[in-house]
Image (cartoon, rainbow, N blue to C red):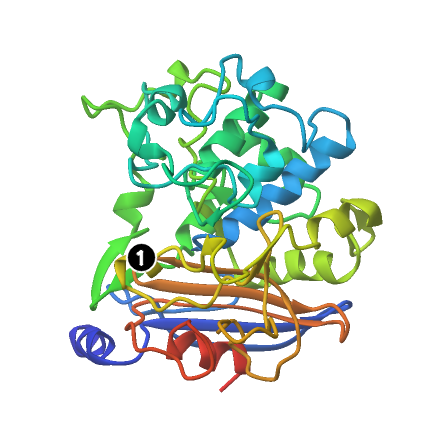
C-alpha cells in the first residue's frame, strides 16, 4: 500500500499538503491531505513541522527588526563594523553594504559561488570568491534574489549578540510566540522531531526522514565531522540555514501570519512595534523592467520570470499592477504580503491580506513543476493559495 501511494505521488499529486486559513483572532479553517511519512503511513496534520524553505527569510527579518528596536543593530550601518572585516563588492569598494541591502536582495551578492558553507569554514572566505558578486551592478541598484545574503545577515546577528543563530532566533521570535519550531532541527523538541514531515521529490524521500534528523544538524566539516563546540560567533552564519532551514508547522506559521496582520502583536504578545512593522512591510524595490531578476531561477529557465515585482525586508508583495508581473497566485488582484518557498520538492507560501485581516499558510511535498495559470508559481501553489 505504501509503495502504491509513493508511485501515485511520484506521478501526480503531492505526497502531503496542508493549508491553514486564519484571521487576526486565530485559525479559521484547516485542510490536511496525504502522508507526512510514506514509509510509516503517518498522515500529515497542521501541527507537523516542515522545512518551509525561503519563508524562513521573513522570520529572520522579524528577528533582525527586534534587534534594531533594541538598538543592537542598524539597518543602514555598514555591516563591516559588526563582522569585524571589510565586506565590499570588489568592483565597487566605496559602497557600504548594509542590512537593508542584504535583506532586500540588493547587496550585489549572488549564489553563483554557493551558500552552503561547511562547519569549520567561514563566510568571509565565501564572499571573497569573485563569482559571489554580480559584476554588472553596484549594491543598491539591482534586485537579485540571493540565498547567500542571509548567512551574512546571520553572521552579523551573531557578532552583535555573541549568540548562536538558532538559539538567538529561539530567544527573539520562536520562544516569545510559544512556537515549537527550530532552524535545522537542532533546537526542536523530541515531540516535534517525531512529527517531522519528510520531503519527497519524484516520490523519493530527499530530506527530513528520521535518519536525517538524527544526523548532523548543520553542514558537516569537509572531513565529515560534526563538532559544534568549534562554533564561533559570526564566523559562519550559514550553519543553521537562515535562508531556508526553519522547521515549523502550518499552525505555527499561521501565528507568524497573524503577527503580520496585527501590526506586530499576536495573542497578547507584542513582538514588534507598529513603526517596525511599517518598515518591514514597505517595499524597498519595485521592478521597472530592467532593475532586477524577478525570480531566483529565472535566468536558468527553471521558472518563468514575473513573480518578484516588489520586495521589502525579506517580504514579497503580490498582485503588482504592472504588465510584466505574474505575482498573484490567489488570482483576485488583492495585494498581499508574505513569502514563497521552494526546496527539495516542497513548495510553501505565507500570504496575508492586511486590509481584509485574513491570511493563508500552506505547503505541499513532492510537487511537480507544472506551471500555474495565474502567476509564475506552480499549479499546486495556486490551488493551495486559492483553497481549491
**Dot 1, how many residues are within 10 Å of its Cα: few (below 14), some (14-19), or many (20+)?**
few
Helix, strand or loop at disc 1? helix
Q: Position of residue 296 (x, y in %)?
A: 39, 55
Q: Nearer the viewer, residue 304 or 51?
A: 304
Q: Residue at x 50, y 53 (%)?
A: 291
Report whether residue 180 is seen. no
Taking 364 as reference, is 76 above or below it? above
Asked which quadrant contains residue 379, the reply is: bottom left
Along the viewing direction, whichever of 80 and 130 lies nearer the viewer: 130
Q: Quadrant of the N terminus?
A: bottom left
Task: Give the residue drawn at x 52%, y 58%.
Answer: 249
Circle 1 residue: 299
Q: Position of residue 322 (x, y in %)?
A: 57, 73
For residue 333, what is the image quadrant? bottom right
**Considering depth in this image, is 297 or 135 the residue closer to the camera?**
135
Check the image and report above or below for 229 versus 292: above
Nearest the camera: 49 or 223?
223
Q: Position of residue 96 (x, y in %)?
A: 57, 25
Q: Is residue 108 shown above or below 156?
A: below
Q: Is residue 21 shown left or right of residue 292?
A: right
Whether residue 100 is visible here, answered yes or no, is: yes
Q: Position of residue 107 (x, y in %)?
A: 50, 37
Drawn side of residue 178 relative to residue 203, left or right: right
> Which residue corresponds to the image point at 54% horizontal and 63% vertical from the top-left?
309
Residue at image coords 48%, 36%: 138
Amino acid at each position: 500500500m505504501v509503495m502504491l501511494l509513493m508511485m501515485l505521488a511520484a506521478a501526480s499529486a503531492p505526497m502531503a499538503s496542508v493549508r491553514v486559513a486564519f484571521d487576526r483572532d486565530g485559525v479559521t479553517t484547516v485542510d490536511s491531505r496525504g502522508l507526512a511519512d510514506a514509509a510509516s503511513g503517518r498522515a500529515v496534520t497542521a501541527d507537523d513541522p516542515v522545512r518551509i524553505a525561503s519563508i524562513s527569510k521573513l522570520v529572520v527579518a522579524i528577528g533582525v527588526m527586534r534587534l534594531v528596536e533594541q538598538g543592537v543593530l542598524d539597518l543602514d550601518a555598514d555591516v563591516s563594523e559588526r563582522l569585524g572585516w571589510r565586506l565590499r563588492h570588489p568592483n565597487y569598494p566605496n559602497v557600504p553594504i548594509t542590512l537593508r541591502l542584504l535583506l532586500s536582495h540588493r547587496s550585489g551578492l549572488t549564489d553563483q559561488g554557493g551558500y552552503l558553507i561547511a562547519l569549520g569554514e567561514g563566510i568571509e572566505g565565501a564572499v571573497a570568491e569573485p563569482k559571489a558578486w554580480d559584476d554588472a551592478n553596484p549594491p543598491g541598484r539591482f534586485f537579485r534574489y540571493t540565498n547567500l545574503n542571509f548567512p551574512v545577515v546571520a553572521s552579523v546577528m551573531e557578532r552583535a549578540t555573541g549568540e548562536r543563530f538558532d538559539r538567538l532566533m529561539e530567544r527573539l521570535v520562536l520562544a516569545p510566540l510559544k512556537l515549537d519550531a527550530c532552524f535545522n532541527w537542532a533546537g526542536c523538541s523530541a515531540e516535534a522531531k517525531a512529527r517531522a514531515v519528510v520531503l519527497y521529490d519524484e516520490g523519493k524521500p530527499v530530506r527530513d526522514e528520521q535518519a536525517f534528523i538524527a544526523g548532523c544538524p548543520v553542514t558537516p566539516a569537509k572531513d565529515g565531522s560534526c563538532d559544534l563546540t568549534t562554533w564561533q560567533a559570526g564566523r559562519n552564519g550559514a550553519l543553521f540555514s537562515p535562508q531556508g532551514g526553519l522547521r515549523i508547522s502550518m499552525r505555527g506559521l499561521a501565528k507568524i501570519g497573524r503577527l503580520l496582520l496585527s501590526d506586530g502583536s499576536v495573542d497578547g504578545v507584542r513582538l514588534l512595534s507598529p513603526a517596525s512593522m511599517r518598515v518591514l512591510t514597505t517595499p524597498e524595490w519595485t521592478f521597472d523592467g530592467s532593475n532586477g531578476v524577478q525570480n531566483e531561477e529565472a535566468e536558468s529557465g527553471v521558472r518563468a520570470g514575473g513573480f518578484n515585482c516588489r520586495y521589502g525586508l525579506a517580504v514579497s508583495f503580490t498582485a503588482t499592477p504592472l504588465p510584466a508581473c505574474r505575482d498573484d497566485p490567489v488570482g483576485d488582484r488583492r495585494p498581499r504580503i508574505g513569502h514563497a518557498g521552494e526546496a527539495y520538492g516542497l513548495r510553501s507560501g505565507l500570504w496575508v491580506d492586511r486590509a481584509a485581516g485574513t491570511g493563508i499558510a500552506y505547503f505541499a511535498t513532492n510537487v511537480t513543476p507544472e506551471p500555474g495559470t495565474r502567476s509564475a508559481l506552480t499549479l499546486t501553489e495556486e490551488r493551495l493559495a486559492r483553497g481549491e
